[in-house]
């Protein structure tokens, strides 16, 4: 997508402008999303990196039945949603089914309506064998869960689920970058600078939650690390759609020091380790 020179700058051509408050970037003629989407959407960060499936990156499911804290279970549902998407990308039938069952277990503890899952659980293998159908299923489940949390004045749980999904996707991305030395994945990690701004702003609204307060300090530490990353977009083809909350751009330039990316990766790994304690 971009060329790399010795000054640790990913560049393209054309006149550049400083990045506004966007979030993430995908491919050529890519879209920068203002607001975070479902945890399963964030899994696309690592969809096209060409890496193989690594089961060691998944959450340890043996601990899931023992969690009782409502906030932590909401956070873990988001993380499991990303793991489910990761398994689906590589058509891992057994792992996908196991993750889905543990999502159902947590949902039951959170008193989420059974009808969110009833339409799918009995025919899960059928969905898993049809990747497009499974993607639609996962997105629908998370849409229904998000709607339920917000409708029942549990917006903090919706935000924690979103945080869990973002963190799990970032963790998998970081591990792929570190284990495989894929520069594109490093770019994608850096491009989450503005998604993190949106996420911390959202979580800050719910600091009555002990779980939210627990993570605000390390997330602010992560934000400070990202302040050392400069992202710019080309003026050519640049278009902002305020109604849809999106920016269209064709080329990016990312300037950073190598130790900055390493620091970001280490904070992500530490954060992820905390959610499964």
Image (cartoon, helix red, strand yellow):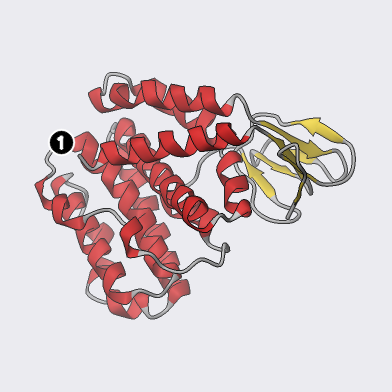
Q: Quadrant of the C terminus?
A: top left
Q: What residue do we see at 47% from left, 28% from top?
A: 222
For residue 195, what is the image quadrant?
A: top right
- Left or right: where 89 falls relative to 55: right
Q: Nearer the viewer, residue 244 or 209?
A: 209
**Percent x, y for residue 274?**
27, 36
Q: What crowding class fits label 1: few (fewer than 14 Cα within 10 Å), some (14-19), or many (20 or more)?
A: few
Q: What residue do we see at 19% from left, 50% from top?
A: 106
Q: Is residue 113 visible?
A: yes
Q: What residue do we see at 21% from left, 63% from top?
A: 101
**Percent x, y for residue 6?**
76, 41
For residue 220, what is the image quadrant?
A: top left
Above or below, 188 relative to 121: above
The residue under label 1 is 69
Q: Quadrant of the N terminus?
A: bottom right
**Percent x, y for residue 81?**
35, 55
Q: Nearer the viewer, residue 23 or 147?
A: 23
Q: Nearer the viewer, residue 45 or 78?
A: 45
- Left or right: where 103 falls relative to 166: left
Q: What residue do we see at 35% from left, 61% from top?
A: 84
For residue 141, what is the image quadrant?
A: bottom left
Q: Is residue 108 visible?
A: no
- Left or right: where 7 falls relative to 269: right
């Amino acid at each position: 997508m971009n060329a790399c020179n010795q000054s640790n700058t990913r560049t393209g051509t054309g006149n550049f402008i400083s990045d506004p408050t966007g979030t993430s970037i995908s491919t050529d003629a890519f879209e920068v999303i203002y607001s975070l989407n479902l945890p399963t959407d964030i899994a696309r960060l690592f969809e096209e990196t060409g890496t193989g499936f690594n089961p060691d990156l998944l959450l340890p499911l043996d601990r899931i039945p023992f969690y009782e804290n409502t906030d932590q279970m909401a956070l873990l549902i988001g993380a499991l949603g990303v793991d489910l998407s990761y398994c689906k990308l590589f058509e891992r039938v057994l792992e996908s089914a196991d993750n889905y069952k543990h999502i159902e277990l947590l949902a039951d503890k959170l008193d989420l309506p059974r009808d969110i899952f009833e339409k799918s659980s009995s025919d899960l293998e059928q969905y898993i064998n049809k990747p497009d159908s499974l993607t639609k299923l996962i997105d629908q489940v998370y849409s229904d869960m998000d709607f339920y949390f917000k409708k029942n004045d549990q917006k903090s749980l919706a935000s924690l689920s979103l945080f869990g999904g973002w963190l799990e996707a970032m963790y998998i991305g970081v591990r792929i970058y570190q284990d495989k030395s894929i520069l594109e994945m490093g770019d994608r990690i850096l491009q989450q600078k503005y998604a993190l701004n949106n996420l911390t702003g959202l979580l800050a609204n719910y600091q009555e939650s002990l779980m939210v307060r627990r993570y605000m300090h390390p997330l602010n530490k992560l934000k400070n690390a990202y302040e050392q990353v400069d992202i710019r977009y080309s003026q050519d083809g640049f278009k902002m759609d305020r109604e849809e909350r999106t920016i269209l751009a064709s080329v990016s330039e990312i300037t950073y020091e190598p130790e900055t990316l390493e620091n970001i990766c280490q904070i992500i790994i530490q954060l992820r380790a905390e959610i499964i304690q």
